[in-house]
Amino acid sequence: MSVFINGVDKQSVDVNAVQVKQNLSAANSTVNKGVYDATLLETVDGDLAVGNIKTGVTIFGKAGTVTPGTLAEDVEGDTPSAVVMNGASASGKEGIWNIGNAEVTLVTKTLNFNATSLAFATAFANVKEVAATDDITLQLYMGGLLMQTSAELPSPPTLNFVLRDFKALAGAQECKLTALSVVAASKIKFHGAEENSQQAVAIAVGSVKLV
Amino acid sequence: MRLKVPLTGTVLDYDILGAKYDGIGVVGDPNDPVKPVEINLGYISWGLVTIDLVNDLAEIEVSPAENINVLKAGGDPLNPADWTSRVSTPTERQGFLDNAKSLVESHTVDELYIMSKSKRLVKSAEVVEKYKKNPPNVAAREQLLAQLENK
């Protein structure tokens, strides 16, 4: 806006001039030369709030309260764990794991996590045969905590039975897949590597560290 | 469907920062893991949602079994060969959930410990105080679980 005095544009001239009233805008950071009504900056732009500023940063007197989260790669544990069957096994074709009236560990992976990491575990079982009367379930543990329990394994079984979950872990921690039954002489027969190219049972664990 | 089931095992610590991201925070003893008491809830699977360290309860998300074992007509229930499996029906699945809910909610916590022959959860007062002052961020866990399910 222009202000003319005696035909001369006197806008925002300091001496003997008229100061034009200006308004701040949240749309940009421009502060035009001029006069302004008294106000609070946060009324001009409501985003100027402590909840929008990170901790340690102060903007126009607003001390931030937001703690930013940062993720960085921690451990990479994508190598499936080896499994040794404890029952009779036709070499390469199949393997038998005797469960019995017990909970047995099928496969485990222990990694050293940064403090604190968010670990992701995926466990799978390549089940070939299981008896309906054996009432076998699979369990996924992470860091001394039972995270998932499957329903009773169906007979005939579902190929590539998968359990997966995530948990904050720090230091040396174990993730494992177990099989549980209350039936004496219960067992699981797994596919062997010669029958298909997959591992019989495996658990893969990876994590990101929380910075 | 969510259920709350009593816990057993030994708590070693409570991870305050971890609880903000995994919605649980509890660190269990691998030699005596923290887990719900072992009661047969029927044809269901479940996943851990969060843990209440004040009342020693696990909140679990229960899902009905997609495939169930059924006895063939005239079959011997003790003979594995007389069993087969099939996909469960919607009515059966609701029945599985109703059964699990009824089993848990029709018994007191004390009764569930006795039925499962489980010991009470072992934990220190210090760990409980950490938990009370820094409750787990369950919403963060639910959000990430939902994303995992969609993959």
Image (cartoon, helix red, strand yellow):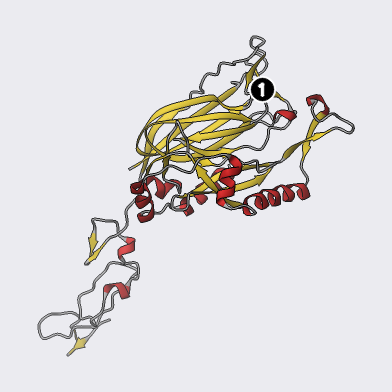
Residue with the most extreme bottom position: A6
> How many neighbours does mark 1 have within 10 angstroms: few (below 14), some (14-19), or many (20 or more)?
many
In what element is the residue under mark 1?
strand
Image position of A96 with respect to A172: above or below: above
Residue A22 as seen in the image, left or right of residue A89: left
Give me the residue at 53% from left, 24% from top. Answer: A107
* Chain at numbered mark 1: A
Residue B108 as seen in the image, left or right of residue A23: right
Give me the residue at 78% from left, 50% from top. Answer: B91
Along the viewing direction, whichever of B94 and A49 lies nearer the viewer: B94
> What residue is disc 1 on?
A187
Residue A65: name its quadrant.
bottom left
User: Is any part of residue A11 visible from this angle?
Assistant: yes
Q: Position of residue B35 (x, y in %)?
A: 52, 40
Along the viewing direction, whichever of A165 and A9 lies nearer the viewer: A165
Give me the residue at 56% from left, 51% from top. Answer: B109
* Image quadrant containing the C terminus of chain A: top left
* Image quadrant containing the N terminus of chain A: bottom left
Q: Position of residue A53 (x, y in %)?
A: 30, 60
Give me the residue at 31% from left, 67% from top. Answer: A48
Image position of B59 with respect to A75: above or below: below
**Which amino acid, by three-letter code, is at mark 1?**
Lys
Residue with the most extreme top position: A91
Image position of A133 with respect to B13: above or below: above
Along the viewing direction, whichever of A166 and B102 lies nearer the viewer: B102
Q: Position of residue B83 (x, y in %)?
A: 80, 30
Along the viewing direction, whichever of A66 and A200 lies nearer the viewer: A200
Residue A164: name its quadrant.
top right
Q: Position of residue B138 (x, y in %)?
A: 47, 52
Total marks in image:
1
